[in-house]
Image: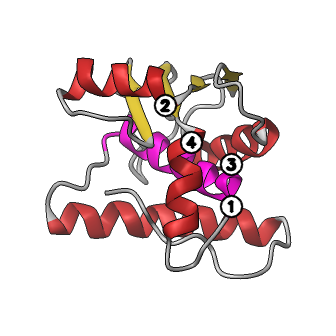
Amino acid sequence: MSIDVNNESGIEVDEQAILDIARYALARMRIHPLSELSVIVVDADAMEQLHVQWMDLPGPTDVMSFPMDELRPPSKDDDEPPQGLLGDIVLCPEVAAKQGAEAPTRHSMDEELQLLTVHGVLHLLGYDHEEPDERAEMFGVQAAIVDGWRAERGLTGPSPAPTVT
């Protein structure tokens, strides 16, 4: 799996954890090991520009996903998942820090960025949360991935609750 993490935000983030949880999420979703993903960490001003340009919404947001080859998790009957370019995930640590501090389970900026990385991966794979049934499915898969990743690393305490709206 080729995953690039590029921090352009000027804020120190745990890039290795972002890389690790992205790799874990893609493996759990059975994405081809030669697929490619880019994760870009930007400041609030850059995120606001992207949010206005692509979503026509004001202010910075926490995560945005830009799919490329529209890869989807293979069905259980597929022998080999397709290979391709997943796309880009853009994260904003300033928004992540605020969301983590305001979440019911209060957690760190890095924990929020890990959650947002999984959220971004799922969007690249076609998941959405506009409708209640879609939201339940996506957030259920997201929680299972984050919880599994944390358990493998022996991390204790409650997992970050979804703060993505």
Secondary structure state at the residue bearing disc 4:
helix
Front position among marks 4 and 3 = 4
Disc on the earlier residue, 4 or 3: 3
Please report the residue visible at 14 percent of the width from the left and 60 percent of the height from the top.
131
Front position among marks 2 and 3 = 2
- Which stretch did the figure color magenta? 108-126
Viewer-nearest residue: 163 or 66: 163
The three-letter code of the residue at mark 2 reads Ala
Please report the residue visible at 78 percent of the width from the left and 42 percent of the height from the top.
14
Disc on the earlier residue, 1 or 4: 4
**Residue 137 sits inside the magenta stretch:** no
Assess disc 2: are there few (<14), some (14-19) or many (≥20) residues with their C-alpha within 10 Å of its C-alpha. Answer: some
Front position among marks 1 and 4 = 4
- In the rendered image, residue 90, in percent from the top left (x then y), is placed at 50, 29
Report which residue position mark 4 lands on.
Answer: 94
Report which residue position mark 3 lands on.
Answer: 21
Report which residue position mark 1 lands on.
Answer: 108
**Residue 110 sits inside the magenta stretch:** yes
Q: CA distance from mark 1 to mark 4?
A: 11 Å
Q: CA distance from mark 2 to mark 1?
A: 17 Å
Q: Which mark is residue 44?
A: 2
Secondary structure state at the residue bearing disc 1:
loop
Q: CA distance from mark 2 to mark 3?
A: 23 Å
